[in-house]
Image: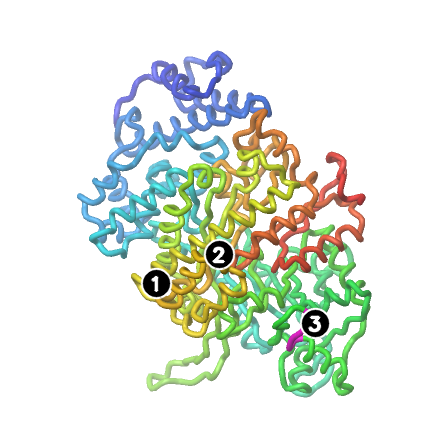
Amino acid sequence: MVTVKSPKDYLNHILQFATENLHINISELNTTISDDYTFEKSIDVLIKRALENIDEANPNWTFVAGRLLLQKLYYQAANNRNFDPELKYGNFYHLIEALTEEGIYTPNLLKKYTKEEVDTLAKNINPNQDLQFTYLGLYTLANRYLATNHDKHTYELPQERWMIIAMHLMQDEDSTKRLDLVLEAYWALSNLYMTVATPTLANAGKTHGQLSSCFIDTVDDSLQSIYDSNTDIAKLSKNGGGIGVYMGKIRARGSSIKGFKGMSSGVVPWIKQLNNTAVSVDQLGTRKGAIAVYLDVWHLDIEAFLDLKLNNGDDRMRAHDIFTGVCIPDLFMEQVEKRGDWYLFDPHEVREVMGYSLEDFYDEEKGNGTFRQKYEECVQNEKLSKKKIPAILIMKRIMMVQLESGTPFMFYRDEVNRQNSNNHTGIIYCSNLCTEITQNQSPTEFLEEFTDENGYIMKRYKPGDFVVCNLSSINLGKAVPDEVLERLIKIQVRMLDNVIDINTLPLIQTQRTNQKYRAIGLGTFGWHHLLAKKRIAWESEEAVQFADELYEKIAFLTIKSSMELSEEKGHYPEYPGSKWNTGAYFNEKGYVNEEWQELKNAVKEKGIRNGYLMAVAPNSTTAMIAGSTASIDPIFKPFYYEEKKDFKIPTAAPELDHRTYDVYRRSAYIVDQRWSVRQNAARQKHIDQSISFNIYVPNTIRASVLLDLHLQAWREGLKTTYYVRSTSNDVEECEWCSS
């Protein structure tokens, strides 16, 4: 054990470190520290005092508390790893050796990198980068993501986590340039210019866990498929994945089974099974499984489906632990607008009578297309049973449940499929748990069961497209002002692409789909932070225009980076015939200037590495770590308490001062949501997948106003909307809700 200075001697040095360059009077931290206190106890007392000082006028106290926590981590790591805490960081190679020996780190780190390479990387670890953390960010990183030994003792420190992630993601790159790529990834992560998805943040470099965030399964209308899907979902949930499930192919309540009419119980019992799976197969012991189930608005069980999350009624028909989403065609929204009728069908009966599946079609143009033709055929066919209901009544039911539970999410299926860059190989039925992923889907089909020559029972399946999303996000509040987007996105796309090859997924279907499309989801967070720094009001044409221009630039750089990677490593297997290949993607977006035309021609000539590229996820946790604002959302309040089950931490908006306050003051439940829709319509044009877009409303909102918001979102081309987050009316006057 290393002998360190006495806690008392060490404390004065630490207090100077904690307040340096923050324009904070050290005497304000003065508090009674007993001679009996250990070093760690003394630090805890000082952290508590620093946190008590955080308010709107003094937000920098969060950095004081963060630096004090840093010193505690340095002290603990030094004692556990046997080095002098004044060094802050110990021997990096010894850390990798120790945690590999304990079975925490993957042996690949030592197999693929020589000691000389690790030592070279260690010289580039910069402890000063730790000073960027707020207390909340560092607390979250330290308590959830830094690697410990099996006794939960502190070993890994923040900059080592970034370096381990970089090493893990670059492990299979060409050895002649691998170290440069590791250092480039470390640059991006350590400067907090970007964050990787939570599973990557937690599991990169370790022996267990996968790196992808979300999955989407498509359930076929058979007992085999339903139970197989439940098993698959349990495996993914166990490994920490969030899951979207499309159940629109399953027959409705009262449908026939093997020709016997009225035998089917519909989708609700199967959804309740998934609900039980979400509760009983938790995510690595940290939280309940997270499953979103989607159903078409024309499905005969839609009314019972919409009631699943209600707190009243028959509890046997409720599933409180899953999330719901509704798949909505343009035609339904048109009928809502004109107060027309809507028809509900049993998908099994449609297949039997009509010879096709209604969910397999969409409108290729706004106001015209195959779906409405097929839907009308179903309406007119007298052999097909159906239920007629005013469309506005279903919409009212959707909105009522949204105000009570936040869901269902809205999935505008026609717009999604019109914009699908791989519509030559499939269709998109629904989104994921967080509504930002839109990729081709199909159910896995059971073919036969047989015994082989050894007497073993074998099952044969035709694998479907089981969607996987691999995510990371740009920190707009830092990367845009520092003008690093071009350099950042180039390494970020490579990091995401490497996740696809390195990842260990528990299902063969997910591995196949991952390789088939090589889909990534490059997203953003810190939008409100960036607006505040640029003094751009949320409710302004300037904000809408800025969103349009910024996300066009991000799209250009992302597509260019994937094209260059394709030139180096080859295009994704389904590229031939895609909109990337034909150039239709660029034509449909209206990208006609010279720069875009050159990129279009380069993509046609050299291919593109990834079939899906961009998606804006909620990323609230990683945004907290990076000290910025979540996703494209407005902040909750300029000052509030961040509460989780294990903490309540005072939090101020990033870089809050007299210059930024006016932009932050227009917070989530105050800003006119119509401006939020307009901003998202502007950025959605440039994002090939979708956006996790929350709608914030008071629970006193008039139904007509919420309806207008949904209609605006649909009309302006949004593909999805996420939660309707309602609150009590103890917020500032909502100026726009009464208009």
Where does the image place residue 95, in percent across and percent down from the top left? 27, 40
Identify the residue under disc 2. 614
Label 1 – label 2 distance at C-alpha: 16 Å
For the stretch drawn in magenta, the main secondary structure is loop
Q: Classify residue 314 as left or right of residue 717.
A: right
Kind of residue indicated by mark 1? Ser
Label 2 – label 3 distance at C-alpha: 30 Å
Where does the image place residue 35, in percent across and percent down from the top left? 41, 13
Kind of residue indicated by mark 3? His
Q: How is the image coloured?
A: rainbow
- Magenta region: 367-371
Identify the residue under disc 1. 566
For the residues bearing labels 2 and 3, Cβ distance under 8 angstroms: no
Residue density around tag 1, few if under 14, some if 14–19, many if 20 or more, within 10 Å: some
For the residues bearing labels 3 and 1, Cβ distance under 8 angstroms: no
For the residues bearing labels 1 and 2, Cβ distance under 8 angstroms: no
